[in-house]
Image (cartoon, rainbow, N blue to C red):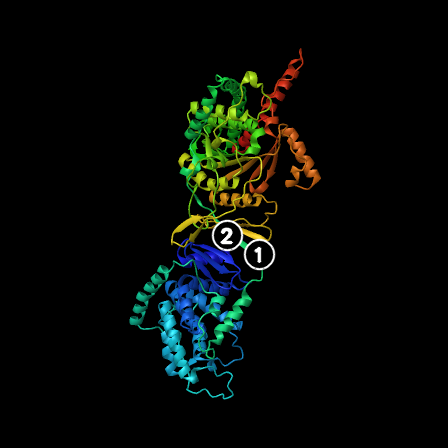
Amino acid sequence: MKDLSTLAKLLAEEDINVIHRHQPTAMFDVLNRELSLPIWKEMSKNIQDLMTVHEVGHALWTPLEQLERAKQEKVEFSFVNVLEDVRIEKLAQKKYPGTVRIFKKGYKELKEMNFFETADMDINKLSLIDRINLFYKHHSDVQFAEEEKVWVQKANQTVTPDDVIDLAKELFAFMEENPETQDKTAAEDDSEGAEGKMMEMPTSGGQEESDDTDGQETPSAGQESDETGDDETDTTSAGQEESDEKGDDKSTETTTKNQAEGGEGNGNITATTDTASKRSTEKMLSEEKTNYIYSSIPKTNMKNAIVDYKIVLDEFYTSYSRQAKLDGHLYWNETLKEFENTKKDSKKTVAYMVKEFEMKKAADLYARASSSKTGNLDMSKLHTYKYNDDLFAKVTTLPGATNHGLVIFLDWSGSMAHNLTGTLNQLYNLVWFCNRTKIPFEVFGFTTQWERHGYNSPPVNDFKSGDMVLHGNLLQFFSSKMSASDQNSMMHYLYMMGQRWGGYRNFSTNGYPYMPADKLNLGSTPLNSAIVMAMDIIPAFQKASGVQKIHTVFLTDGASDKIQEKYHTYKDDYDEIHNGKKGISTYGWNGDVSVISDPKNGAKVTGSDYSKGQGQTQTKMLIALLKKRVPDMNVVNFFVAGSGRGGKVSKYFWNEFSFDYKEQDQMKKDMKATNCVIIPDGQGFDNLYVLPGLNSLDMDSELDVEVGANKGALKRAFGKMSKGKMMNRPVLNNFIKMVA
């Protein structure tokens, strides 16, 4: 289906949505610029391409008005369909000469398949309309009487849909008046009447491929005069323009149902080959009952999606300062002392880890260093010429160091409450580390609260029909561009927020916690929307910072909210276009297949396992698209698996990753030993790091040594304490490993 979609888009010459549905033929939604194609059975590429080009031609150039006029004027619809096929295939071949080959090869195979039900039949005894149909479907052995050839040429000269209707009426009347042009296959008399002659295929505005050339396209001997060709060129454009201008209807379509309800006609004179082709087409439709649900990645409006850190600071300050006046700044001052102590305690550990990082980086560079001879004599070795062949000076080349950048997306949902203080402490260590090592970084909290309490907040993604409807915003908490003062204030404000759920506090002496502004409070989990936003944010960050290697971190504690809707355009009774969701689904249930495409690069992913009622499969699909959007990026997930104040990981949690009890036991041992379990390719991420509840991590490992201990015991105790400090910073520790 991917190849067919690409071909359809190329033919349409615009960024339309191409979808596949269980339907008899093509449909084109003019308002939403959405082309739907039937789902066919397995077939050869030649027939697939033919069907696609043919259906795209109907969808783009056959307006619904044509069908309505045929019905109103009681025109035999098989005539209309045959002549319309000639017109739209001519337009396709004229616009895209390469499709000449597609039609020729495709119809050759269909003929061999008895698609038109003419096997063991003398096709020259068929009616004139049938022979015209077969002639333009590349049946080379069709014959016409001299008075019939004019109708063959007229079929090739139609330009507009109205031309087709008019010609269908004229041809039907001619055949009524001339019985010899009607079907003679059922007649007992086997005489041919007028002597028939072969007729060459018109070029239909394109180029015809020669059988004795190796796929080279050459003009046919039956090519029309230049005068006719010029007329065709002018009127084709006009006809297409007319068709486009009539696109006010919700959709243009050519369906079997509509065809059956078309012109009533005589009933005795009909194109039997057209009816036969419809039967054959229905047999080629897939019997698979899978429902495909399509949506596309929208363009993020970063101005609306990202709440600048200065605005976040102002919102925190406004809400906190008002409450601080009521308690004499007690909670403010006490939490500031606690935060400064945390900062002081982490300073030495972060400095140590910076030093270790620099050593790892230097060791790696040395390992990859290469030496080469310069071609210049090393004068210090010249005296050894009798026993040393290597007298040339050497130069050691160090490979260029890759500069790194970090973007973090922090889960700002209600379930993070009891883990918030510990999570923030881990985050602060990472920010301080990046400050020391000059690694550019951005930290965003993804939340629904700003949108929910933003009072008519503008949309976070630019509208385009078929795009996923994103929810939530990104709160910019930290940036390498922030001043030290702003960074310190933000850390304190967030620390105050974390302490609301951070365990026991003596409120009488330490102050009662402040409430943040509603729009800054914890909400639900728009992780999937954040991943989509990241597709525009990360490339912009990389361009602005000039870094070579991007590390993207999603720090979460649960499954994402589902993106369940896509934008759709409707036409109301007042001819006013309004953009809305209207329950248009993007989310697949059991038995459905969700297809998400990225119009930026043409990438497409599918998924169907949505039985859990959450967005895990959608998350995996979006991560795959993010990797395609930003190649050579390291994207990981730090997953806080522990819950509650104890921060323990449920024994049922490990079933998410393995049902092997031995593997589960090993994971539990790793968690106890290192406070982290690494799962490669977990949930689609490069690595998934499973963490305990971060409030259970003691950031401050104490020196455990007995009084009077000897030097060896003291050394071991200090080593254990240093190791503990590093182990209690799993986010930073694992980030260093990624970068170094």
Q: Secondary structure at mark 1?
A: loop
What residue sits right under mark 1 in the picture? 290
- The part of the image, by quadrant, that contains residue 232 is bottom left
Residue drawn at x 52%, y 43% is 623
Location of residue 495 in the rendering, given as x and y in whole percent from the top left corner: 52, 24
Location of residue 640 in the rendering, given as x and y in whole percent from the top left corner: 59, 33
Can residue 650 be seen here? yes
Which amino acid does the dot numbered 2 rest on?
Tyr
- The part of the image, by quadrant, that contains residue 204 is bottom left
Residue drawn at x 38%, y 79% is 149
Horizontal relation, residue 23 to residue 574: left or right: right
Residue 332: assigned label:
none
Location of residue 148 in the rendering, given as x and y in whole percent from the top left corner: 39, 81
- The part of the image, by quadrant, that contains residue 440 is top left
Do callouts 2 and 1 mark residues in contact (Cβ within 8 Å)? no
Characterize the local packing of mark 1: few (<14), some (14-19) or many (20 or more) Cα atoms within 10 angstroms. some
Q: Secondary structure at mark 2?
A: strand
Q: Nearer the viewer, residue 738 or 523?
A: 523
Characterize the local packing of mark 2: few (<14), some (14-19) or many (20 or more) Cα atoms within 10 angstroms. many
Q: Nearer the viewer, residue 464 or 595?
A: 464
Can residue 549 be seen here? no
What residue sits right under mark 2 in the picture? 294
Q: Nearer the viewer, residue 399 or 457?
A: 457
